[in-house]
Image (cartoon, helix red, strand yellow):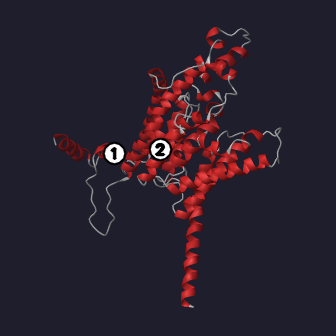
Amino acid sequence: MGLKQNLHNLKEKYKGTKMEQGFNALHTFLYLPNITTHRGSHVRDATDLKRVMNTVIMAMVPVLVFGMFNAGYQHNLAINGVAEFLTMDNFVVGLSKILPLLIVSYGVGLGIEFIFATVKKHEVEEGYLVTGMLVPLIVPIDLPLWMLAVAVAFGVVIAKELFGGTGMNVLNPALTIRAFLFFNWAAWMSGGEVWVQGAVERAQQIAKLKLQGVEQLPDAISGETILGTLAANKEVAYSTSDMFFGYIPGSVGETSTFLIVLAAAFLIFTGIGSARIMISSIIGAVVMGLIFNGIVDAKIITESSKFFGLMSFPFWKHLMVGGLAFGIVYMATDPVSASQTNKGKIIYGFLIGFISILIRVFNPAYPEGVMMAILLMNVFAPTIDHYVVQGNVKRRMKRLKTKTA
């Protein structure tokens, strides 16, 4: 009771000052706002935007923790060739790399949100609570922190605040941040080495020494290093269970399809995630995968084709590799940038899955297509909803004319 009274006194103290918005944001993080409606009819509910965002964060915590173990596991596996998964050493390695990404993501993003709220004199918006968690989960483990800070600033200012803040953005902010990173620092965002902690740094050291004309590389670099092990095992074939449960290299949060499926069920059960978008996205990916498999089976292309490998990849395995599952569950379902109508959600989701596999197979410049597919459909979501609504209006007008005839 004393704590609540002290908080109330502080609220009165900061009321009308520049600190009011910042204090209210911290106060309502734990306590419900005491603001109530006074006129008109309203739909009353026990939840609010902040609680919705916290529920999504709860759905991301398992993949975050798994990503910490997997980061250390991939690191030790690359060095030693053998490693156990659930060890404290793996967790410490992952934590030491992922925690700074989280701190920078939230520190820069929320800092900008607080600045805009103070200057514009409006409440601090809760939308970045989810974005701040998503960003570290969709970037490589060794991404330099200054790059992440610049990208987060760009994403928050350009993709959110420029459009009016939370609820007004056209593009998914987390994917906008990732796209900014990809197109500005592609070498840090793609390639076999970026997914294993320490490998990029060793690759740069080796390249630098070779440019200097050093033929005999130091043992610390040329011996049993991550880079050497990766090169020696470039054609490693991962089992289906490894791909499904997540014991493979990748972005921090994307590898475990199993945990992502559980998160999808949780979000659908709580009514926050759209089952229509998720299911239609899966169908779209499966259809595109089946088309490619059919082309291979019909021998329309030969094994000499540069597209043969991915086109012959079993359609159902496409769902377990890369960021497809993660993107479908956590970002395609963004209620702001996704379609709003029921039929529109089905069309929107189907095209995301369909285009993701299309880009994955046909465009070597983008090793993963889900980012571009979701951003593209974010742009077309309002158009999809427009034609769905117009179609409904035309059908109702037709029925009305039939009845009055």
Q: Residues within 10 Å of mark 2 (few under 14, many from 20)?
A: few
- Quadrant where the N terminus sits is top left
Q: Is 234 placed left or right of 261 in the picture?
A: right
Mark 2 vs mark 1, foreground winner is 2
Which residue is drawn at the image coordinates 68% and 40% (left, top)?
366
Farthest residue to the left: give it: 2
Residue 42 location, quadrant: bottom left
Which amino acid type is shown beneath numbered disc 1? Answer: Ala
Closer to the chain start, of discs 2 and 1, is 1
Give the residue displayed 50% in from the left and 25% down from the top. 85
How far separated are the C-alphas under marks 2 and 1? 31 Å
258 or 126: nearer the viewer = 258
Whether pointer 2 and pointer 1 mark residues with C-beta atoms closer than 8 Å, the reply is no
Tell me the residue at 46%/54% (across/down): 167
Kind of residue at badge 2: Leu
Residue labelled with disc 2: 262
**Mark 1 highlights which residue?**
25
